[in-house]
Amino acid sequence: MELSSSQKAGLIFGGVFLVAGIVLSTIVFLFWHLIREDVFEDVVILTNDNGICYVETMDDVPKTITDCNLNPGDKTTIKFGKDLAWASIVIP
């Protein structure tokens, strides 16, 4: 069976389109999982070590907060990425 030049061009175009789709879907899939959802949680400051506060959250990953001026026992709301070890204070 002999393919005409337009059939060959169509086959090449389809192959390139398929390969590009596979590559793009793989790249998007990888980057999609690098983007973590933001979690907001009300917590109590456990310690303040020279501007670095430590809190415990519901995901059992201790969080550190830099540039913190709160005292141990203060309640605040923090924002953090799911399963990450650092957080920031949410300013209302």
Image (spheres, rainbow, N blue to C red):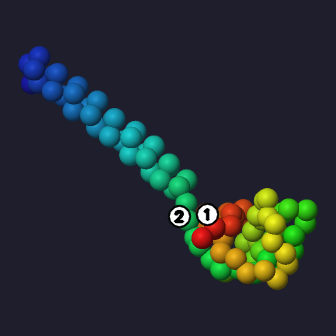
Label pair 1/2, CB-CB below 8 angstroms: yes
Q: Is mark 2 on a helix, strand or loop?
A: loop
| Residue 50 shown left or right of residue 22 in the figure | right
Residue 51 visible at all = yes
Q: Quadrant of residue 73?
A: bottom right
Residue type indicated by callout 1: Gly
Q: Which residue lies furthest to the top in this view?
A: 5
Where residue 48 appears, as percent x and y from the top left, is 87, 70
Classify 4 as above or below 72: above
Instruction: Depth check: give the residue in front, 12 or 59.
Output: 59
Rendered image: mark on residue 81: 1
Total numbered labels: 2
- Amino acid under disc 2: Glu
Circle 2 residue? 37
Residue at 32% over, 40% down: 21
> Residue 79 at what x, y percent from top left?
62, 67
Quadrant holding the N terminus: top left
Q: Which residue lies furthest to the front in this view?
A: 92
User: Image point 47% across, 53% down: which residue?
Assistant: 32
Secondary structure under badge 1?
strand
